[in-house]
Image (cartoon, rainbow, N blue to C red):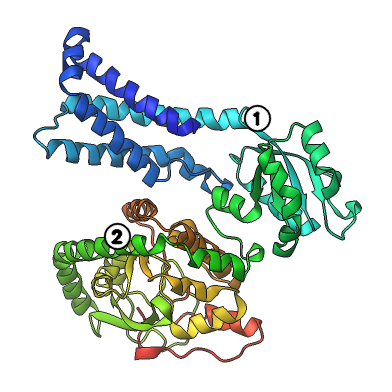
Amino acid sequence: MFLTLGDWSIILLAQLAAVFLRLGFDVGLEYLADNWGSLSSAILIFMVVFYAGGMYEPPTRSRRVDFDFLPLIVTALAAGITGLVLYTRPQMTLGRGIWAISSVLILWLAYVLRRLFMALVRRGIFLKQALLLCDHPNRAADLLRLLKDNPSSLYRVAGLVICGAAPASAYAPDPPVLGGAEDLGRLIETNDIATLLLSVSPMRSHELLSRLRPLRYSGVEIMDYVSLSEELAQEIPLAHINDEWLMTVALNSSVMQIRKVKRATDIVVSVVGLVLGAPLILLAALLIKLTSRGPVIYRQTRLGLGGKPYVLFKLRTMQTDAEAQGAVWSASRDVRVTSVGYYLRKWRIDEIPQLINVLKGEMSLVGPRPERPEFTEKLATFIPFYDERQLVPPGLTGWAQIRYPYAASFEAAARKLQFDLYYIKNMSFLLDISILLRTFKTILVGLRHEDDFLPGDDKLERLIESAGETEASPEPNGGTP
């Protein structure tokens, strides 16, 4: 709320300052009276782009640099969209000088506001006094680690309340164990507690309902580990969910409406993208033919919605005999990638043909990245709920790709699944826009979000062997994307 209100104030003040700096006070007042509609529209556009661009997500330790420099990227994008919208609508005008001055002011002030916010957080200005109710030392450690990894969590844990079989001596000394579940009411009152954080097993959570319900009526905020992880890390922790939780997500009545909006958007964007991208595809096809042997388009079977297989299209970026010398670890500059393929991958031009899959309804613009059938089968054996990715159509880009771009272990694949589950539960048009904007940012800086396990890599095969499996997956179609 602090950042949202702060940004709204910044955008308003920046526009007022730009008007008066550019036109003077008297003329500026007349300009404001005549153009309040354009100025209000600019504020709305900036706020929507700020939200979609992730300006209000908590700065985790891994995202601290992103949090610092995000205002530069998102404000520039918002300014561009504002100019495009206002200057293509004759009835909505905004002077170029005013637009430029206000954009620069918003850029600087948005950055300063976020530095101020973090300084206030470090001083404990916004912190809420909380108790942690847990039933095992490991669960307590998980939640405390989550808070530590997210500096803007705004919760200060005053102590632990334990309800499991483990004795108080089994818990870390900081924060201290203050009592048991029977002491909750007294501890909340004497410690001026605003929030109760839960890190207990689903079964234990049911047992505690009767004890927790009165606390809600007294105004105490109750946050379980899954909800807290959603809020702070934008992921769903696999170790803290069960089939009941997944069924609750599956019964979300708004999903069908969201899918209709997504499908309409997919059709429009894929048609426009294929038309605009046709020259790039033709140029890339010519360069591929001139520099290497083999087909221009690479085809491979992937799994889509409901586990239904389909053929994915890509521009070929590797040699057709990529596996002739045996499987090797994938690297940022893989020797199997052609000279042209390196740049096609860097700028993600090789993925433009997947818009055909989007148009056909086999994929969406945003969703979990599609995986090969044999890899999905292996991963589902060792990672719980892995098949839940197939509840929505796979996407060209996804929440997991922008938050955790590369997975080379079962642990990393499981972490990406947590982000995929977050997307499935919180799927919305605005979240899709946010993901697309960040993907666009990634393309601009030339970074690539690789598929987790590329055909021809031996990552998965080695992982399977380390887990007791020895059968390696064969490469279909005899090629490597």
Question: Residue 184: x percent and y percent?
Answer: 80, 43
- Residue displayed at 60% across by 75% down: 383
The vertical placement of 283 against 298, above or below, is above
Q: In which quadrant will I find the C terminus?
A: bottom left
Instruction: Give the quadrant of residue 302.
Output: bottom left
Instruction: Give the quadrant of residue 443.
Output: bottom left
Which amino acid is tagged 1?
A: Gly
Of residues 295 and 33, the one drawn nearer to the viewer in this rendering = 33
Q: Is residue 354 left or right of residue 375?
A: left
Q: Earlier in the sequence, mark 1 or mark 2?
A: 1
Q: Secondary structure at mark 2?
A: helix
The vertical placement of 58 against 418, above or below, is above
Question: Residue 133: x percent and y percent?
Answer: 76, 49
Mark 1 crowdedness (10 Å alpha carbons): few <14, some 14-19, many ≥20 = few
**Visible in this render: residue 28?**
yes
The residue under label 2 is 261
Q: Secondary structure at mark 1?
A: loop
| The disc label shown at residue 113, or none | none
| The disc label shown at residue 124, or none | 1
